[in-house]
Image (tube, helix red, strand yellow):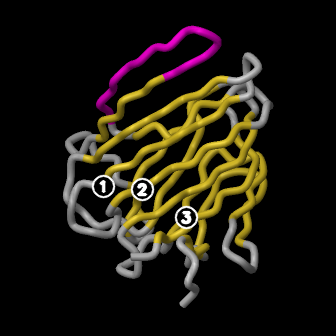
């Protein structure tokens, strides 16, 4: 095993709705004009915590939603809810909000402009509530920063996740890294 702190992981499979998506030899997933993208088999007993790195652009100004996934099925039941807190900063304005719903928030993006997001995922494969922390930079308005923190209500083990925009589609690259114990 590598001695580096982060290990790039290769999904066992992907599923998508859109033009194309593929797993590279090193494990990164490139996707084009997708309205839904799912990565399977990236979380396992090998690591407790993970980093997901996203670079993408979209066809509409919308939020990027996420759901945890186990054995090829998204966790989206109304009784198993996601709670997330949002902090947004642009120019000299800072605002916040909180939501509880059947999805979590992975990012916010604007139109076809490029965006970046780093998602720290804590304990998705452990039988404990999965938590995440995201830092997202949006190129709309010159630069806008979003900071998200979220938890899931269930103590379930997940091996993957799904991302999808509220509307339109996204094109980009996603990589998942395991954090050495």
Check if mark 1's residue and mark 2's residue have beta carbons within 8 Å.
yes
Label 1 and label 2: CA atoms lie apart by 7 Å
Q: Residue at x 51, y 69 (%)?
A: 40
* Element class at badge 1: loop
Q: Residue at x 21, y 46 (%)?
A: 153
Quadrant of res 39: bottom right
Given residues 58 and 144, the one toward you in this image is: 144
Q: Is residue 16 left or right of residue 43?
A: right
Where in the figure is residue 81, as x and y percent of width and height? Answer: 26, 41
Check if mark 3's residue and mark 2's residue have beta carbons within 8 Å.
no
Magenta: predominant secondary structure element? Answer: strand
Q: Is residue 96 magenta?
A: yes
Q: Quadrant of the C terminus?
A: bottom left
Looking at the image, tell me whether mark 1 or mark 3 is earlier in sequence order.
3
Given residues 89 and 126, the one toward you in this image is: 89
Looking at the image, tell me whether mark 3 or mark 2 is earlier in sequence order.
3
In the picture, the disc for residue 130 is 1
User: Which stretch is magenta?
Assistant: 88-101
Where in the figure is residue 44, as x and y percent of width and height? Answer: 40, 76
Mark 3, residue position: 39
* Element class at badge 2: strand
Residue 106 position (above or below residue 20): above
Q: Nearer the viewer, mark 1 or mark 3?
A: 1
Label 1 and label 3: CA atoms lie apart by 17 Å
Mark 2, residue position: 121
């Amino acid at each position: 095993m590598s001695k580096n702190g982060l290990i790039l992981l290769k999904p066992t499979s992907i599923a998508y709705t859109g033009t194309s998506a593929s797993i590279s030899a090193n494990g990164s997933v490139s996707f084009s004009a997708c309205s839904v993208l799912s990565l399977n088999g990236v979380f396992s007993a090998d690591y407790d915590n993970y980093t997901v790195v996203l670079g993408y652009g979209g066809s509409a100004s919308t939020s990027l939603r996420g759901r945890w996934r186990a054995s090829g099925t998204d966790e989206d039941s109304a009784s198993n809810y996601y709670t997330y807190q949002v902090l947004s900063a642009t120019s000299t304005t800072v605002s916040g909000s909180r939501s509880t719903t059947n999805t979590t928030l992975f990012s916010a993006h604007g139109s076809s402009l490029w965006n970046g997001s780093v998602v720290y995922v804590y304990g998705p494969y452990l039988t404990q509530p999965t938590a995440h922390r995201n830092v997202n930079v949006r190129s709309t308005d010159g630069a806008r920063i979003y900071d998200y923190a979220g938890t899931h209500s269930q103590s379930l083990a997940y091996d993957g996740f799904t991302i999808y925009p509220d509307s339109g589609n996204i094109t980009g690259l996603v990589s998942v890294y395991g954090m050495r114990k």
